[in-house]
Image: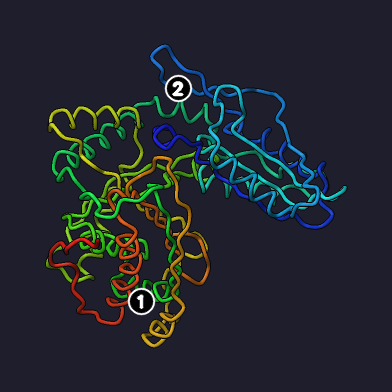
Amino acid sequence: WAAMQRQQASLVVGGAYPLPPGTTVQDVAADLKFLMCRHDSLRTRLRFAADGRPQQVVSRSGEVPLKVIDPGDADPAEVAAALYAHYEEKVFDYVREWPVQWAVITRGTAVTHLVTAISHLSIDGMGAMVLLADLAGRDPATGLANEPVSALQPLELAGLQRGPAARRQNKAALRYWERTLRSIPARRFADSADQRSPRYWQATYDSPASYLAIQMLAARTQSSTSAVLLAAFAVVLTEVAASSPAVIQVVVDNRFRPDLAELASPMCTSIPCVIDVADAAFDDVVAKASRTALNAYKLAYYNPVERAELEARINRERGEAVDVSCFMNDRRNDSRAEPVDGQLPVADDVRAALARSALTWGWRRHRPSDKCFLSLNNVPGTLYFDLYADTHYLSPADMEACLRGLEATVVGAALDPAAAAAGRPAARHS
């Protein structure tokens, strides 16, 4: 909710998808009805208390619109993509509108595309996977679910969060946040020498070589590929942002308990990892990153309102705002590429793959966003980096240096086990 307010967007989860030939409007309406009835999170809207704080309201029943759009002479795929782009920019009416916006593009009586946009208040990435699994797992004859929802529903989750165990967890997490906010330098990034308008830029980097290298590094260091990438990001940030130690908020799924594993509601929160890479070999940085992240994951479940209040109090006491606006979100699923015994890549594979690396510049926006946000996207057979940044702090050249530096760091460390990490912050790129 705080991010949605800050970025002036509903941060929708969804997309525009072609549908199989023969799909009807009634088929899509049945899918939508099934999901709305099955998951309380899709029937959750907001009301606001007297002090302005949002409260969640779950409806027992209602009607949800399914838009049906005839594109005329236009390309249905282009119409679907444009509609989803509209939803990405739209701010939902959280009190009156359902968090689910669905539309179908038709050509005559045939449905060609589905456009789905669900507010991030109702689902996150893993929640979307739950919805897809539910649709795929229905009884083909009746269209009904083969089993009831096993995960907690939002009202049950709210009751659990009021309990003593959750309160103890929250206190421990807030203590961790307080120690971190009081101990780190306040600034993460200096002002950029190349501030652009629109201010916020996106770039992606497709790196098959990194995909192979992180498997070699994870096997060598006996860690996960996520820890390897967190270590590499810490190294690159230290060099590009000329700031030490690296402070990176990792996004944590928080579905570790059995009754939360299949939850559609958003459970992801972020927690800072402080990683000092100075005078360390890369394998040692991986070990630091792994230990730091493991400790942080345990403390990534907390009351975000209380965390924001804590941050505001510490900022007042320090007399300056402590910047923690740097994130890493590992969104890989089937492309996670953990090492498999006997099937590791070799150095020649990594070198050969370097020729296939590709940098692509994406959207440019005026809408406020975070200073630096790195996502690792779920693209099989490669490591697909997605970076967006505030060019008032990270110039386009800095962004490119980050993405190419991530590849250079993991490839260099994979090919040279003695490779050192950053000894000191480097000069910023212009």
Residue 232: x %, y % from top left: 29, 65
Q: Are marks 2 and 1 in contact (CB under 8 Å)?
A: no
How far apart are the two marked residues, 2 and 1, measured between alpha carbons?
A: 47 Å
Q: Provide the residue designation for mark 2.
A: 54
Tell me if residue 266 comes above or below residue 23 in the rendering.
Answer: above
The quadrant holding residue 366 is top left
Q: Residue at x 44, y 14 (%)?
A: 49
Type of amino acid at the residue the image marks with label 1: Met
- As rendered, which of 236 and 38 lies closer to the eye? 236
Quarter of the figure that contains the C terminus: bottom left
Tell me if residue 119 comes above or below residue 223 in the rendering.
Answer: above
Q: Is residue 65 left or right of residue 388?
A: right
Tell me if residue 191 comes above or below residue 354 in the rendering.
Answer: above
Tell me if residue 151 comes above or below residue 383 in the rendering.
Answer: above
Residue 243: x %, y % from top left: 17, 55
Q: Is residue 377 left or right of residue 236?
A: right
Q: Nearer the viewer, mark 2 or mark 1?
A: 2
In this picture the colour scheme is rainbow
Q: Residue at x 82, y 41 (%)?
A: 26
Question: How many neighbours does mark 2 have within 10 angstroms: few (below 14), some (14-19), or many (20 or more)?
Answer: some
Which label's residue is closer to the chain start, 2 or 1?
2
- As rendered, which of 147 and 368 lies closer to the eye? 368
Quarter of the figure that contains the N terminus: top left
- As rendered, which of 155 and 311 lies closer to the eye? 311
